[in-house]
Image: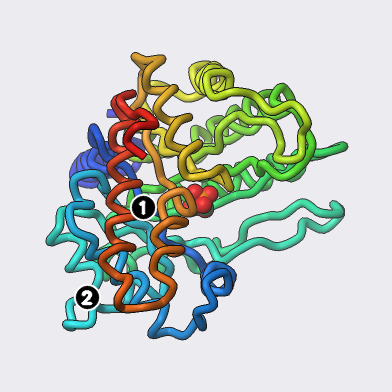
Amino acid sequence: MGTYCLSPEISDRLAETAQALVAPGKGILAADESNLTIKKRFDTIDVASTEENRRAYRELLFTAPEIQDYISGVIMFEETLGQSSSDGRPFTDLLKERGIIPGIKVDTGLTLIPGTREEKATQGLDGLGERLEGFEKQGAGFAKWRAVINIGGHLPTRLAVEINAHALSRYAALCQAAGLVPIVEPEILMTGSHDADACERVSEWVLRTVFSELSAHRVFLEGMILKPSMVTAGDTCPEQTDVDTVARATLRVFRRVVPAAVPGIAFLSGGQSSELATAHLNAMNKMGPNPWELSFSYGRALQEQPLKTWQGKTENLAAAQSALLKRSRCNGAARYGKYSSGME
Ligand code: 13P
């Protein structure tokens, strides 16, 4: 049935999980910061990045009351997948009991592409098949792999676009063979002085290349989620575009390139403020109907406010959880185009 080498049981399960991840009104909490990245986040609130502090912070997020109404899945770093709550429940069990699907970041970070000055390839393909089988046994239902593309001067090069599309597709095919839904994340960085037109051209090129490779690698489109960046001007571009212009340009690109068989597009926030990330998602959903669910898979845009509120102090825990609930609720409303700044 066009699912290539996947058994009907696996393809049905993949499609079901992918649809659950982009269920109406819900999106994904990206809490998969590597130890290096979470240290940078903890530095901003003067908290030491010890294993226990990382565990306590993730427990705060995963046990926040009511978030299951707006959060369908959580992406974790490998260390977190094996951790438990303070009352001894493995995070994977705790999340599943709340109806939240546990996910795992499986790439192992970026490395310079030889022959280019500053472009990066994502690592982690060696031994990935066995690692994925282990993660599936540990309770993960989906996985994530992030590729990074820079705009600026002569960038991106064709080499960088092709290497990254190839690795994303190899990863996606391996995930599906192991029964995990791949989140395919080609992030076009907002860093730089390029304008929104440049971002639109590069986004279309990158996504076309990614979908061509996904097809060559026989990836089952109904059993994957795309996690892209939005079409915006670079962060130091003097001409910033308004919310509706971002939404229109982003939809223009995706309608041209993303097959309707893909159940959902779950955006990353990429350094946008929490409120702006919500407003952009809201505007795109207002401009529907669209062939796919338009959802969120935000890291910073969901966690910035809870992290700032927490400050590493137990007495701030409930307030930090309320901050996460508030952002989740705002983004849940944006899934229907029903968010308003009054909700802030
Ligand atoms: P941001 O939303 O902070 O960009 O993070 C999403 C993510 O998972 C990046 O890989």
Q: Is mark 2 within 8 Å of ligand 1?
A: no
Q: Is residue 179 visible?
A: no
Q: Can you tell which mark lies on residue 11?
A: none
Front residue of this view, candidates 325 and 197: 325
Tell me what residue is drawn at x 43 percent, y 84 percent. Answer: 51
Question: Considering only order in the chain, which callout, 1 or 2, is on the residue closer to the N terminus?
Answer: 1
Q: Is residue 5 visible?
A: yes
Q: Can you tell which mark lies on residue 90?
A: 2
The local crowd at label 2, few if under 14, some if 14 to 19, many if 20 or more residues have their Cα within 10 Å, is some
Q: Quadrant of the N terminus?
A: top left
The percent position of residue 41, horizontal first and vertical second, equals 54, 67
Front residue of this view, candidates 293 and 321: 321
Quadrant housing residue 311: bottom left
Q: Name which residue type carries label 1.
A: Leu
The percent position of residue 10, horizontal first and vertical second, equals 24, 46
Q: Is residue 55 above or below residue 141?
A: below
Tell me what residue is drawn at x 33 percent, y 53 percent. Answer: 142
Q: Quadrant of the C terminus?
A: top left
Residue at mark 1: 29
Quadrant housing residue 139: bottom left
Q: Is residue 292 above or below residue 58?
A: above
The percent position of residue 4, horizontal first and vertical second, equals 35, 37
What secondary structure is found at the residue carrying circle 2?
A: loop
